[in-house]
Image (cartoon, grey):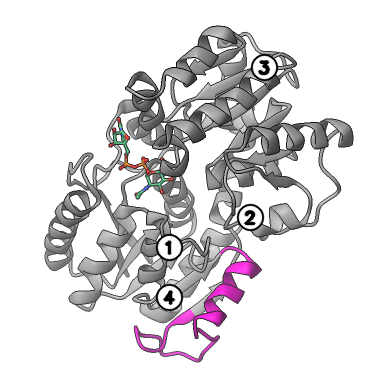
Amino acid sequence: MKIVTIIGARPQIIKAAALSRAIREEFQHDIEEVIVHTGQHYDENMSQVFFDELGIPEPDVNLGVGSGSHGVQTARMIEGIEKVLIEEQPDALVIYGDTNSTLAGTVAASKIHVPIVHIESGLRSYKKQMPEEINRILTDHASTLLFTPTKAGLTNLEKEGFRVSEPPYHIDNPGVFHCGDIMYDNSLHYASVSDERSNILNELELSPGNFVLGTIHRPSNTDDPENLASIFMALGRISLEKQVILPLHPRTTNKIKGEGYEAVRKVLDEYPNIRIVPPASFLDIIALEKHCYLTLTDSGGVQKESFFFQRPCIILRDETEWIELVEQGAALLAGSSEERILSAWEHFNDKGGIPETSQIFGDGKAAIFICKTMLENLG
Ligand code: UD1
């Protein structure tokens, strides 16, 4: 069986590591993978570092599209992916998550009848103003095999008319599978590797439990100066109690330098215990997540990894696709409100951590299940 895998944004490169590892270790005689990097992320520390660290094969093709408006970026990708699909004639296109690279794969493949395998399907924020929400919905509805990481994902798909059906699967009779989260596969696999190889705590002179980890990159936070200032004001207050480490996405770093963000710069001047550091590699972010006191984030990946490592998480959004984290008391939604962030901070301080939780994200073998199911149904 031949698959073309599309990656482009940082989290997709990480997710692809789990599937590529399963292929190399268990299915190397059955599955041939052609990896296409759209080039959506291109900085060394947003892309190449993950290939070096996670042992993913180098991409067979890099479309080099770079940044741009949604339309320009996605259109360039569609054109490039279509060419590769026509040339490679794969049995399926594998795409991850909800980025513009995902959507481009969907449009390119569905129009020339290449079956789509969507990994991380069914997630919804129920906010169509989020670019990712549109990307997810369109992708799910053009896919042949949908792999959902959580029960909530399955329920969301059922609400949209999907049901567990009998093979043969095709775009009009898609197969829906609840298989667990391949990011959980990765965290289990790389947690011990991170212990051995990451030196980030020493580099940043951090002691375990004594710092807070924050990440901010969603347009709803970064592109609204008031929202970003409000988050930073809360971080300033928190930094009086624990050092705040912020490995910032380039989008956020660029924004802070610009007009309108004076209030954010003022907080950074007043509170030197907020430290902005470059985007972290995967092994480094795992080390930071494992050893921090708590995380504050608008990233889906960091929300889940906090849970995997049993750290409390303050979600810098008004809603989350990973609703089980909130239901179990492991995470609290705070949006960009200074007051809500600080009250979530007090909450976890009082509780001294998160309550005992049950397993939500599967058995750490989602990638193997996905490979087997692809072979049975599309091979
Ligand atoms: C994208 C995804 C988002 C995902 C995130 C993970 C979409 C719509 N969004 O958001 O779902 O959570 O990736 O990181 O696809 N930039 C650089 N260097 C890079 C990449 C980006 O400087 O290597 C800067 C550029 O100014 C660029 C901006 O970041 O315009 C935004 O990048 P883009 O890929 O459009 O979206 P992300 O915010 O990264």
Q: Nearer the viewer, mark 2 or mark 4?
A: 4
Whether pointer 3 and pointer 1 mark residues with C-beta atoms closer than 8 Å, the reply is no
Q: Of the residues shown, which amino acid type is indicated by label 4? A: Leu
Residue on which disc 4 sits? 145
Q: Quadrant of the N terminus?
A: bottom left
Q: Quadrant of residue 107?
A: bottom left
Residue 239 circle label: 3
Comes first in the chain, label 1 or label 4: 1
Marks 2 and 4, Cα distance to the nearest angstrom? 20 Å
Kindly report the secondary structure that dominates the magenta region of the rendered protein: loop
Element assignment for label 3: helix
Element assignment for label 1: loop
Q: Of the residues shown, which amino acid type is indicated by label 1? A: Lys
Q: Of the residues shown, which amino acid type is indicated by label 3? A: Ser
The one nearer the camera, 274 or 266, is: 266
Compared with 278, 111 (above or below) is below
Residue on which disc 1 sits? 128
Residue on which disc 2 sits? 364
Q: Position of residue 153 (x, y in %)?
A: 58, 68
Marks 2 and 3, Cα distance to the nearest angstrom? 35 Å
Which residues, given as a range, are shown in magenta? 149-175
- Find out if the beta carbon at label 1 lies less than 8 Å from the nearest ligand 1 atom: no
Q: Position of residue 45 (x, y in %)?
A: 37, 27
Mark 2 crowd level (few <14, some 14–19, many ≥20, 10 Å Cα): some
Q: Can the viewer see residue 350 in this picture?
A: yes
